[in-house]
Amino acid sequence: MGGPGGPGGGQQGVFVINKNAKRDQGRKAQLTNIQAGKTVAAIVRTTLGPRAMLKMLLDPMGGIVMTNDGNAILREVDVSHPAAKNMIELSRAQDEEVGDGTTSVIILAGELLGVAEPLLEKKLHPTLIVSGYMKALEDAQTLLKEIAYPVNVDDPEALREIVRGSIDTKFAARFGTLISDLAVQAVKTVCIVKPDGRKEIDVKRYAKVEKIQGGELTDCKVLDGVMFNKDITHPRMRREITNPRVVLLDCPLEYKKGESQTNVEITKESDWEKLLQQEEEEMRRVCDDILKVKPDLVITEKGVSDLAQHFLMKGGVSVIRRIRKTDNNRIARVTGAHICNRTEELQEAMVGTQCGRFKVQKIGEEYFTFLTECKDPKACSVVLRGATRDVLNEIERNLHDAWGVARNIILEPSLLPGGGAVEMELAARLKEKSKTIEGSRQYAYRAVGEALEVIPRSLAHNCGSDVVRAMTDLRARHAAPGHAHFGIDGKTGKVADVKAQGIFDTFAVKQQTLRTAIEAAAMLLRIDDIISGISRKQQQQKSSAVMGADDETFGDARDG
C-alpha cells in the first residue's frame, strides 16, 4: 500500500470521475430520492377525489393548462432531479396502460418512499425493505382478487354507473351522465370481437374527439360514423349525398413531376402543345379509372389538380383532398371501403357502401364533412361543444379517462369498492399478516399497509373533514371482517358504505396502480449512488452561450 501511488507516497489521489460531476452516495442518495418522490406526490395530492382542486400551469409556449388530471399536470412540470423524472414517468405509464388512476399511483409511490425513511434511519438494509415490499405486493394482489366481484357488461346502466364513479372526481361531474354516456357509447362502437372470442378495443386510433367551440354542452354526441374538418374541393360538387359509394385513395390526382429538376428544350410550338396534351391525357386516364367503379365520393390523402377536379365533377363525383392518414383509416372502418394506392388497381370490392349519408355542413366559421348513418360502424367521432377552449380541453381529458375505465371493464369485467375502501381493507389485512412474518422484513411489510392508508386520508383531507376521526372510524370498521366496502364518501368526507352508494373502481386500474407504485418505490430505494456529470462538450457549449450573451466576460469566467 505504501508504494508510489499509495497513501505513503505523498502523491495526489487519482480523479477517476470528472471534477464537475456532482455525486451523492449511500444514505444521502437514498434520502434525496425519497425527498424527490415525496415532493412530486405533494404536487398532485390535492387533486384526488370529487372535491379536488385544479392546478393552473403555464406551458413553455405561454399557453395555460387548467386541470386536475394527474398525468396532464406532471407532463407540464419541468423537473431536473432524476428520481422525480422517474416518478413522472409512472403516471405516463399508468395513463397509457389503463387510462385512469394517474394521481393515485403517484401519491402511493410517494408515500411508499416516505414510510421507508424511518426504516433506513433504523439501519435496515434497502434490500430487506425491497423484499418486504415485494412480498406485500404479492399478498395484496391475492387479496384484491378475493375482494373483487364480477359485473354484467351487457347491462348499459351498470356500465354507466362504473364510468360515473371515475368521472365524478373530475371537472365533467357537473354535467351529469353526459360524459359517461359518450364514453360507453364510443367504446362499444369500436369494440371488435375476434373469432377466438377475444375483444379488441382501440380507442386511441378509431375514436376521434372533435372539439368545436360554441354551442351547448348538451350538443355533445357520438356520431354513427365520422366527421372531419374538410370541405369539397369545388363549389359545384354535391354537398349532400344519400347512400354514397365511397372511394378512398392514397395517391395524388395530379400530374407527376420529374424526380429531379428536369429541363426540356422545345424547338417547335406544336411540341409544347403535345406536352400539355399528354398531361391532360394522363389525368383523363386516371379519372377514367376512378369513374369506372361509379363512385359518388372520392377522398384522397394527397392533392387533386384542377384538371382532375374538372373531369370528376363532370362525372358527378364530390372530391375531398389532403385528408389525414388516421382519418382515412377511420373512414375505411365506417364505410367498408379499402384504401387504394394506385387508381389502376381500383375494383368494385374496394368501394365503400355502408355509409348512409354524406353531408358538408358549416359550423361556426368552418366547414365540416359528416359521413353518418353507417351500418355497424367500427369507428366513430365524438363531437364536443363548449363555451371556451379550456373547458373543451378539460372535457376531452376527462373523456379519455372515461374511455380507459369503460375499456378496462369490458375487457376485464370485475369491480372493487372505491372511495379508499380497498386500500383500507388491504392495509388492515397486511398489518394483520405482518405479525406472522419473521425477522426485520416484517417492518417493511407493515410499512406498505401503513402507506396504503394515504388514499382514504387524502380523500378525507381534500373534503375538508376531520381526517383523524374519519381514519380512526375506518380502521375500527375494517378491523372486523365483512366490512370491506366501507370507505370515504368523497363529496362529504364522511365514512360511508361505498357499495350502496355506487362508488366503484375497476379491478384493472387498482391492480396496475398497486403494481406500478410498489415496484417503482422498490427500484428507487435500491439506488445508492447518483452521479450527475456534465461532459466537457456540454460545458463548453454552456460557457460559449454565456459569452455570447455577455461579451465583457473576463478570462477566469471563461476558463470554467
Image (spheres, helix red, strand yellow):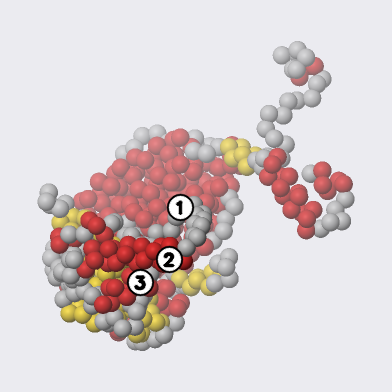
- The residue under label 2 is 270
The structure residue drawn at horizontal position 15% and vertical position 60%, both measured from the top left corner, is 349
Foreground residue, 293 or 250? 293
Mark 2 and mark 1 lie on one chain; the one further toward the N terminus is: 1
Screen quadrant of the N terminus: top right
| Residue neighbourhood size for the residue with mark 3, other residues' Cα within 10 Å, grouped as few (<14), some (14–19), many (≥20) | some
Mark 3–mark 2 CB contact (< 8 Å): no
Looking at the image, residue 26 sits to the left or right of residue 291; the answer is right
Mark 3 and mark 2 lie on one chain; the one further toward the N terminus is: 2
Classify residue 421 by image quadrant.
bottom left
The structure residue drawn at horizontal position 27% and vertical position 69%, both measured from the top left corner, is 298
- The residue under label 3 is 307
Q: Is residue 224 visible?
A: no
The image shows residue 178 at horizontal and vertical percentages of 28, 78
Q: Is residue 118 visible?
A: yes
Q: Is residue 358 above or below residue 406?
A: below
| Type of the residue with mark 3 | Leu
Foreground residue, 7 or 317? 317
The structure residue drawn at horizontal position 26% and vertical position 81%, both measured from the top left corner, is 238
Marks 2 and 1, how far apart in space?
Answer: 25 Å
Marks 3 and 2, how far apart in space?
Answer: 21 Å
**Mark identifier at residue 259:** 1
Question: In what element is the residue under mark 2?
Answer: helix
Classify residue 16 by image quadrant.
top right
Question: In what element is the residue under mark 1?
Answer: loop
| Type of the residue with mark 1 | Glu
**Mark identifier at residue 63:** none
The image shows residue 346 at horizontal and vertical percentages of 21, 59
Screen quadrant of the C terminus: top right
| Residue neighbourhood size for the residue with mark 1, other residues' Cα within 10 Å, grouped as few (<14), some (14–19), many (≥20) | few
Foreground residue, 79 or 367? 367
The structure residue drawn at horizontal position 13% and vertical position 65%, both measured from the top left corner, is 154
